[in-house]
């Protein structure tokens, strides 16, 4: 009998140790996942910042090119129309008509 109780006690001690180990492992894994998420967020933020910086540079370059093009165009005399009236009206799209949908009255 003593041997059975000693074996049972040993099994219980081993099971408790395993449970404690699993709990510690969960804690470590949770911390590792949190650290990985923080690092990934940092990488994403850096990439977004780089992309925005590249976009800003392209915008500045485009503005410089546009300014040069505007400066190179001759000024129009007063009263001259850059686009004939006929073609200007052709560029404007008519607004679609609104259709009202009436709800059926329930009896």
Image: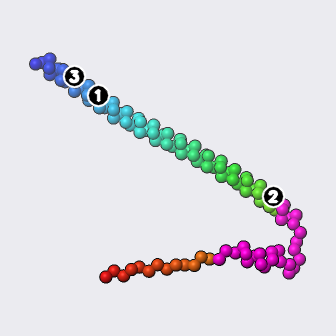
Would residue 10 be counted in the magenta stretch?
Answer: no
Q: Quadrant of residue 83?
A: bottom right
Above or below 27: residue 97:
below
Q: Quadrant of residue 85?
A: bottom right
Above or below 40: residue 57:
below
Q: Looking at the image, is mark 1 or mark 2 nearer the viewer? A: 2
Residue at 86 percent across and 64 percent down: it is 71
Q: Which mark is residue 87?
A: none
Separation of marks 2 and 3 at Cα, in angstroms: 82 Å
Separation of marks 1 and 2 at Cα, in angstroms: 72 Å
What span is in magenta?
A: 68-94
Residue density around tag 3, few if under 14, some if 14–19, many if 20 or more, within 10 Å: few
Q: Which mark is residue 65?
A: 2
Disc with the residue nearer the chain's start (2 vs 3): 3
Pointer 1 residue: 17
Residue nearer the viewer, 40 or 102: 102
Disc with the residue nearer the chain's start (1 vs 2): 1
Q: Which mark is residue 10?
A: 3
Above or below 57: residue 99:
below
Residue at 61 percent across and 46 percent down: it is 46
SS class, disc 1? helix
């Amino acid at each position: 009998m003593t041997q059975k109780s000693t074996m049972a006690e040993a099994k219980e001690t081993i099971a408790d140790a395993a449970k404690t180990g699993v709990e510690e492992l969960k804690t470590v894994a949770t911390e590792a996942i949190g650290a990985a998420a923080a690092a990934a967020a940092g990488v994403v933020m850096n990439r977004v910042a780089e992309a925005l910086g590249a976009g800003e540079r392209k915008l500045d370059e485009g503005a410089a090119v546009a300014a040069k093009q505007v400066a190179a165009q001759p000024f129009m005399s007063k009263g001259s129309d850059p686009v004939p009236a006929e073609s200007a009206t052709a560029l404007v799209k008519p607004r679609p008509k609104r259709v009202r949908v009436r709800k059926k009255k329930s009896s």
